[in-house]
């Protein structure tokens, strides 16, 4: 299994060769960048092993700079992704489909639209998680017939997060935490009217409809995932309804996790319900070579994010792709030498992308 640095060197070496060819044959037209070539070659390798078409859906949500410039909603699952999946799958025949998923989540309703779009053409569908698929991305994975995970990969809770205004700022808060706060306020005020003065400024900021909105959001997340589990992953099981309830009541309860970003790993999922089809790619029963191929593709993706302005990539190895990018400022070095992200110097690491040098 290659390391990230090895994949980065492979990309840099290819780009150096492409640059040399361009100098030798000027005017030959625009070339496909090395990072795209290598990444798509790695995706094709996965297809060669599984014999199932593969679509990549990934965002660079680990880059605080890109999230700030592009906007959090653009980096998350949103309705624009319907167009992305339409573009990417246009030449894939109806039948089985794999989706490699790396996302922090996003809109449950947009996720529902994507599931409907994919299910109208493809079955069965498997989701491959190389690293992180949280929140609405966990919901999306639960719409699959099977989830394949790298041992270190993680899903997350599906409890909805509400946007509220606090001291002039829009912040995200767990719907269940808001409900719990309402209940606490009610109990304290009923027991002691003097507590009203303490709670009134807090409750005024929450607004009159927020409590019901929280209840609706929690019900929506649970209803969608329960329906998908029963129709796909748990279909045919005599305990499908019971197991689906167990899964959504656990993943959908904020108080089970205390933080929306908590990790849900392979064993956590298997412990929830015996009928869940979750495959550890390091297990002997997994397809030979698939774990290596998945990690090679993930490192190629991570290097691409590190050396370009791309923050969302939805693509098939054939070149059908929908890529969103931010503008990247290119700094020309004062002394002769390779520019950052160019051949000769490794692309930015994930930690560097999170905290760029000032």
Image (cartoon, rainbow, N blue to C red):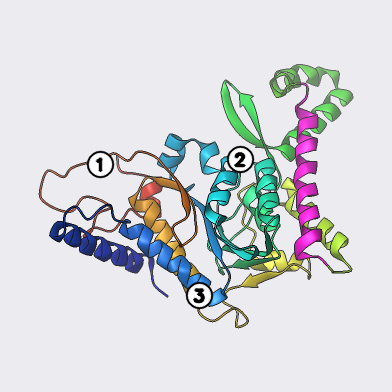
Mark 1 element type: loop
**Quadrant of res 302:** bottom left
Give the answer, above or below, for where 280 lies relative to 17. below
Q: Quadrant of the C terminus?
A: top left
CA gap, disc 3 and disc 1: 37 Å
Q: Which residue is mark 2?
A: 79
Label 3: few (<14), some (14–19) or many (≥20) C-alpha neighbours in 10 Å:
some
**Residue found 51% across the figure and 43% down from its top:** 75
Res 10 seen here: yes
- Return the residue at label 3: 48
Residue pictured at 82% horizontal, 32% vertical: 183
Residue found at the far left of this picture: 335
CA gap, disc 2 and disc 3:
31 Å
In the picture, measured across the screen, residue 167 lies left or right of residue 183, that is: left
Q: Secondary structure at mark 2?
A: loop
Res 135 visible: no
Which quadrant of the structure image shows residue 37?
bottom left
| In magenta segment, residue 222 | yes
In the picture, the quarter occupied by the N terminus is: bottom left
Q: Which residue is mark 1?
A: 330
Packing grade of label 1 (10 A; few <14, some 14-19, many >=20) is few
Q: Secondary structure at mark 3?
A: helix
Which residues fall within the magenta stretch?
Answer: 208-235
Image-based side of 142 in relation to 106, left or right: right
Mark 3 vs 1, N-terminal side: 3
Asked if residue 168 is positioned above or below residue 31 in the image, the reply reads above
């Amino acid at each position: 299994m290659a390391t990230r640095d090895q994949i980065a060197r492979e990309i840099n070496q290819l780009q150096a060769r492409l640059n040399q060819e361009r100098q030798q044959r000027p005017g030959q037209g625009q070339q496909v960048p090395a990072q795209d070539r290598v990444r798509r070659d790695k995706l094709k390798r996965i297809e060669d092993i599984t014999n199932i078409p593969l679509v990549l859906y990934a965002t660079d949500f680990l880059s605080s700079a890109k999230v700030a410039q592009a906007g959090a909603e653009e980096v998350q699952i949103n309705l624009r992704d319907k167009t992305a999946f339409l573009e990417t799958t246009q030449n894939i025949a109806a039948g089985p489909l794999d989706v490699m998923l790396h996302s922090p989540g996003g809109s449950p309703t947009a996720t529902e639209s994507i599931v409907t779009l994919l299910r109208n053409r493809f079955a069965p569908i498997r989701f491959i998680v190389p690293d992180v698929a949280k929140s609405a991305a966990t919901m999306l994975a639960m719409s699959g017939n099977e989830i394949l995970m790298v041992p270190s990969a993680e899903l997350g809770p599906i409890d909805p997060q509400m946007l509220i205004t606090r001291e002039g700022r829009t912040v995200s808060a767990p719907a269940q935490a808001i409900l719990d706060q309402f209940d606490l306020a009610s109990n304290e005020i009923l027991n002691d009217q003097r507590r009203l003065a303490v709670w009134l400024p807090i409750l005024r900021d929450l607004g009159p409809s927020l409590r019901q909105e929280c209840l609706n959001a929690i019900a929506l997340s649970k209803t969608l995932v329960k329906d998908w589990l029963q129709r796909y992953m748990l279909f045919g099981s005599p305990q499908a309804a019971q197991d689906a309830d167990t899964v959504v009541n656990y993943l959908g309860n904020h108080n089970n996790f205390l933080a929306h970003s908590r990790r849900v790993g392979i064993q956590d999922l298997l412990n929830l319900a015996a009928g869940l089809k979750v495959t550890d790619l390091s297990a002997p029963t997994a397809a030979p070579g698939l774990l290596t191929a998945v990690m090679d593709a993930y490192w190629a993706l991570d290097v691409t994010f590190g050396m370009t302005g791309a923050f969302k990539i939805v693509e098939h190895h054939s070149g059908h792709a929908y890529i969103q990018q931010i503008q990247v400022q290119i700094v020309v070095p004062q002394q002769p030498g390779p520019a950052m992200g160019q051949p000769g110097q490794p692309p930015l690491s994930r930690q560097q992308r999170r905290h760029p040098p000032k």
